[in-house]
Image (cartoon, grey):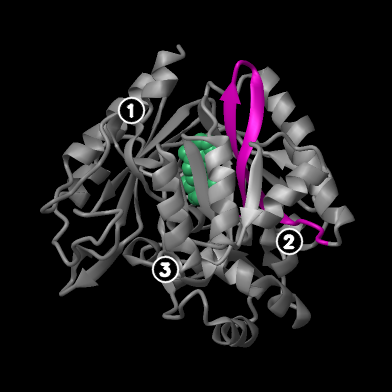
Amino acid sequence: MKILVIGGGGREHALVWKIAQSPLVKKLYCAPGNPGTAALAENIPLAVDQLDKLLAFAYENSIDLTVVGPEQPLSLGIVDLFESHGLKVFGPSQKAAFIEGSKAFSKDLMQKYHVPTAAYGVFTDQAEAEAFINSTGAPIVVKADGLAAGKGVIIARTCDEAISAVRDMLSGNAFGAAGSRVVIEEFLTGEEASFLVITDGKNVIPLASAQDHKAIFDNDLGPNTGGMGAYSPAPVVSPAIHEKAMLQVIRPTIDGMAAEGRPYRGVLYAGLMVKDGEVKTLEFNARFGDPECQPLLMRMKSDIVPVLLAVANGDLGSSAIEWHDKTAVCVVMASEGYPGDYRKGDLIAGLDQAAEVKDLYVFHAGTALKDGACVTNGGRVLGVTALGATVKEAIAAAYQGVSRISWPGVQSRTDIGKKALERL
Ligand code: AMP
Ligand code: GLY
């Protein structure tokens, strides 16, 4: 088979790494890819939003399966476009990807189908939003309705902070059109988990549990990022929580999307808040999480290609996924300044030395080649991911890799996996 992976981040490097191991694959492409994917696939210099060019490439090269990593091309309708030309593609349609593309839509869906979530309101008017904030009180959460690369969520500690966040969003200054409507919701406490499933719209295969680390600094302090590290499995997802997530969140959402005329196929990612044995849904994403994908795919024992193909064909049948009985920990190394404006173009030292650590793989995200050397080229630069027999061993191996890699101003959290250790 010939497979095309779309995207160029750590998630896509992990997908390429996993897909390349399949005996079914004869040729693998990645668009646009990064220096990491270039070692395993042929990179095609097309951006993820160049849908017509991606279609022409897939058509001319007889691609048997396209796997879409990021949300942007999904929201632009890449799946519909490819399918209308008879091409097989893994991912939700534009109408189904709306579950991530609009937070207002996803909250209304949850309310309609009784999926547990935080109390909320949706606003386009500043005065109405202010009245809601003042009557609810702080802390309170303000979210841009549309896509904002994981940064459109403000946890406001005071009503004034919430009101000014709403003003920034509604005026278009903060997130452009994505902020022209806002969701304001109750602040939830508890421990977060990333609960991902693969579905054909009827059948559901839950993936192993995972936990992200959204905040930039240790102990979940500082502003939110796209994710500073992840591990799998996440002990917060006990068998009872797993069952609740499937029954109360995943099943009604997939059935609800079908009932709304938006049948869902692909990866459905539920961001959960777990507290006192109950789950509430923070958000849905229409794709693999990044960095959750990196530890998840390192733990996946089964060939992923037959599963992706079965979903693209619309029938998972009795497909199943087996997992290595190990823990995987991914520590993200980021550029100085991230998640704000960040430095670029710094030489990355120690990649070869890190690769010598046993059961460790360094996934590339924001990297580039300059005069044959690897340099930083994005906010999140690398995802250093290790497998271990225990959480402790996986953490130790991942940080051994991290300690061997450096560039000026590099930042990474030192506490990835700590919450799993505390639950032992
Ligand atoms: P979202 O993109 O909606 O998942 O929000 C990003 C992050 O913001 C989540 O992973 C949480 O850490 C935090 N967050 C979102 N909604 C809430 C909420 N209602 N209460 C507390 N934290 C939240
Ligand atoms: N790591 C969170 C996300 O992919 O949205």
Q: Residue visible at 51% across and 27% down?
A: 189
Q: Quadrant of the C terminus?
A: top left
Quadrant in which residue 230 is drawn: top left
- Residue extending furthest toward the top: 424
Q: Nearer the viewer, residue 135 or 348?
A: 135
**Which type of secondary structure does the marked residue at label 2 adopt?**
helix
**Height in image: 131 above or below 66?**
above
Residue 306 visible here: no
**Percent coordinates x, y for residue 163 in the rendering:** 45, 51
The residue identified by callout 2 is 96
Q: Which residue is mark 1?
A: 395
**For residue 272: magenta?**
yes
Q: Please check the rendered image and state whether residue 69 is part of the magenta-colored stretch, yes or no.
A: no
Mark 2: C-beta under 8 Å from nearest atom of ligand 2: no
Q: Secondary structure at mark 1?
A: helix
Q: Is residue 135 above or below residue 390?
A: below
The magenta segment is 262-287
Q: Are marks 1 and 2 in contact (CB under 8 Å)?
A: no
